[in-house]
Amino acid sequence: MDPRFDASTDTIDEYLARHEGKQLLRFLTCGSVDDGKSTLIGRLLHDTKGIYEDQLAAVEGDSRKYGTQGGHADLALLVDGLRSEREQGITIDVAYRYFSTEKRKFIVADTPGHEQYTRNMATGASNCDVAVLLVDARHGVSVQTRRHCVITSLLGIPKIIVAINKMDLVDWNRDTYEAIKADFESFSSHLTSREQHFVPMSALEGDLVVESSPKAPWYEGPSFLELIESIEIGAAAQETPFRMPVNLVIRPDLDYRGFGGRIESGIIRPGDRVKVMPAGTESTVSRISTFDGDLEIAGAPRSVALVLEDEIDASRGDVIVAADKPSIVSDRITADLVWMHEDRLTPGREFILRHGTRVTPCRVRRIVERLDVDTLERSPVDGLELNEIGRVEIETDFPLAFDPYEEIRGTGSLVLVDRIGNWTMAAGMVRGRTEDNRWTATPMSGEGRNGEPDPVSPAEREARYGQRPATVLLTGLAGSGKTSLAALLERALFDLGRVAIRLDGSTMRRGLNRDLGFSAADRSENLRRSMETAKLVNDEGLLCIAAFVAPLAATREKAAELVGDDRFLVVHCAAPLEHCRKNDSTGLYAEAEAKGLQNIPGVDFDYEPPESADLTLPTHQIDPEESVNRILDLLRSKGFLR
């Protein structure tokens, strides 16, 4: 209960009704050691009557033992709760305090200023709307001030208040205030642009903390409390695309099936089209349920249960998103990490990754660079030490549905956990999908194995074989008829006196690609190796028939670049999933359902149909011979067959 609650004038119901509609602001205080962070929070609690009489009496007693303010109450002790903090006069752990005014409710995180406690500071900043960065007026912008400025910027805190404290110790000199303000603005101009406010104050004496002060007649702005009461927050989360990680499936009876979770961004209404990621299955919201009844609209950060019109598969770890603005899906991501453990991070190390409600094994494939928060310089390294910040590439066992952290924090943040001890090892901000640089090799065509002129020219090969080399990629879901069609096409070309080599995803995985799995990264590598083979086949003047699922459009585009756009044809075997399930001779879909197999295109892994295929074959409607004839006609029309 609020210490200001007066039972003689308020009933509990009246008090709750008055405070229920207040907006909640989360902010943290950060800055260098002894800049007055805990004192500021203590002053706010004291001057807004946010503490009880017995708490104040206890602080006055502790002040005589641990205090640093002579005979006065040391208000910092209201926040510094650890014995070691009181004895040393510093903040070590993150302390959370709640207080309210007539205009707003506040949760404040008091974070430590020492460099060795940077991980604690990053933890406190993770859910805040505003960062309050304290600067000692005597010392100005310090190394730790810059460090905390950089971290709050990396963590995407959209607004920052620079509180220039201890102005009483410089006699409220305006030139000192203006010099610190200019110095900070110069440094922060190199970071991501965000809203900045400056306020001079004395947290110890209370000047410009809650009310204005005659000691600074030259300052015409609001006091610190007036600033945090009026600063705008909250609109951005509801203006972004809808995202809701599924926390649980609610099925109390046969007539109800809802997907429960907290809305991380955007708004949702009955009738809105949504997708369940990473599978990409689409449906329409029929109801928005809560404990208090159905809603016509819901937005972040409310917890709800969504009922969908279609019986589609969704479970904990999936993300329900706006159908017209889906999230990114990948099992290879690039992220900025704040390393939080004494053990050094090295490439190849494996962790458990927590992203929203998704939990998946992962490994750090590469450490790209380390950020020097003092100079803002980035340099290549082979490891990260405690409290260091670096950019890494991570590969996960299961694909993640994510957004860049700067766009949506809720689906752009992650935590790395030790697989054995369950310790939190790092906090991360996702920056995007990792680009696969293995595709960037320059194709060699028309040259010998050592870069010398080929002893047999392309024209001679064309004259001998009666064909121009080309790769025909047959892409489609498992069971769409790719493999059978590839075999029939090879036979037809042979009967025409042409020479073709057939590559199949299954046979490649039994040999050259037997070390690969079925993640997005491994699927990409499977196709890359196969297309390198296809390129060599084409360089010898032969036709190549490649039957691969190749579910991602970006990977198919890279395959075309590798082989050569002028000799690469995409044929889409466009059979629907229901037909593929019925005609699946390998038993893949049945096994996936029985054993819970993951990363099955069309089921729990997105298949992106080609938007501009050279030929689309409805293999569920036409017979294989007709499909072969259409491909042969395509090859003739493109000039690959004479």
Image (cartoon, grey):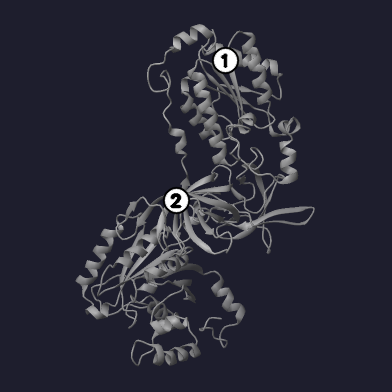
Discs 1/2, front:
2
Location of residue 629 by image quarter: top right
Judging from the image, what secondary structure is the residue with disc 1 in?
helix
Judging from the image, what secondary structure is the residue with disc 2 in?
strand
Left or right: residue 358 versus residue 406 is: right
Instruction: Judge whether 209 appears above or below 330 on screen.
Output: below
Give the numbered dot on residue 619.
none
Rendered residue at 44%/88% (across/down):
59
Rendered residue at 55%/42% (across/down):
324
Please name the residue that numbered disc 1 is placed on. 634
User: Given the image, on which type of amino acid does mark 1 rest?
Assistant: Leu
Q: Quadrant of the C terminus?
A: top right
Left or right: residue 443 versus residue 572 is: left
Q: Quadrant of the N terminus?
A: bottom right
Instruction: Judge whether 61 appears above or below 383 on screen.
Output: below
Rendered residue at 78%/52% (across/down):
255
Location of residue 225 by image quarter: bottom left
Left or right: residue 260 versus residue 79 is: right
Cα–Cα span, label 1 and label 2: 45 Å
Instruction: Judge whether 27 appears above or below 459 on screen.
Output: below
User: Given the image, on which type of amino acid does mark 2 rest?
Assistant: Val
Residue positioned most to the right:
254
Left or right: residue 264 versus residue 182 is: right
Q: Which residue is at the front of the view, 163 or 31?
A: 31
